Amino acid sequence: MTDQEFKRNTAYKLRVGEIFLGKPIFDQERFNFLELGDKKIVRVNIIGNVVDKYESEGEKEYIFMTLDDGSGQIKIKSFGEDSRKFKKFQQGQTVVVIGTLRNWNNETYIQPEIIKEMDPRYLLVRKLEIEKTKKETTPEIQKSDIKALKDKILDKIKDSEEKGGAETEQIILEFREASPEIINQEIHNLLEEGIIFEPRPGKLRYLG
């Protein structure tokens, strides 16, 4: 896929946490797109706070920034002459980033096309905007269906004990009848109830 083809893709408005729920899809070793539900995501539109910045001072020009929107953190990486236009952005600023998703060495990051400073209040505006869109597009799930889903998730975790636990990502991929948000909420409920525990991020085990 050429750079021109990348730029024709929709820049999806997402929160950082949603990006890490997606599954990176590769064409051989080259990152192709991020699979999130029924979407194939190449470009994103993210609002967050710049919490870290590193700028090269040698012959190889690059700028790395870390963006945090309250749901997670993601790296913004710009290389060569392109990085010069992003020098003015500093730690502590709230920005909107429109760019292409990349994945290298098991790390998903954003290669920016546009970075623009925003009023910090837009962080909340974006969060509410995304939540409203989800409510409009996600079908209502009955309480009995949620209870059944919770039981299925617990059974999956129990059955994975011999393998050292279940991966959150595997559970999301297996139970496609529910959205990643609902599955994560039920996993959160099981953790709060003390039925399961998380020995490391993304790994779930049954407490018994």
Image (cartoon, grey):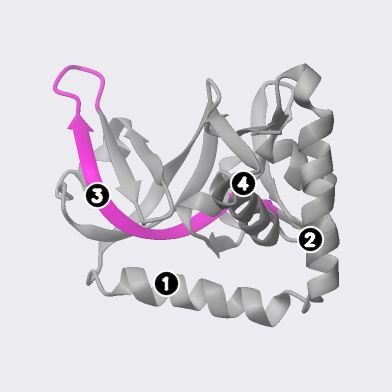
The answer to whether residue 95 is visible is yes
Residue drawn at 82 percent across, 57 percent down: 149
Question: In the drawing, what numbered circle is on residue 50?
Answer: 3
| Residue 70 drawn at (x, y percent) | 37, 56
Does residue 115 sit above or below 26 in this rendering? below
Whole-angstrom CA distance, mark 3 to mark 4, is 22 Å
Whole-angstrom CA distance, mark 4 to mark 2, is 13 Å
Q: Quadrant of residue 75?
A: top left
Mark 4 or 2: in front is 2
Residue that carries the numbered disc 2 in the rendered image: 178
Residue that carries the numbered disc 1 in the rendered image: 126
Q: Quadrant of residue 122?
A: bottom left
* Secondary structure under the numbered disc 4 in the rendered image: loop
For the C terminus, give its image quadrant: top right
Report the predominant secondary structure element of the magenta stretch.
Answer: strand
Residue drawn at 85 percent across, 71 percent down: 144
**Which class describes the residues within 10 Å of circle 2: few (<14), some (14-19), or many (20+)?**
some
**Which class describes the residues within 10 Å of circle 4: few (<14), some (14-19), or many (20+)?**
some
* Secondary structure under the numbered disc 1 in the rendered image: helix
Q: Is residue 123 magenta?
A: no
Residue type at the position of mark 2: Ala
Residue type at the position of mark 3: Val
Q: Nearer the viewer, residue 153 or 48?
A: 153
Residue that carries the numbered disc 4 in the rendered image: 21
Give left or right: position of 76 versus 39.
left
Q: The magenta stretch spans which residues?
A: 40-61
| Residue 55 drawn at (x, y percent) | 19, 30
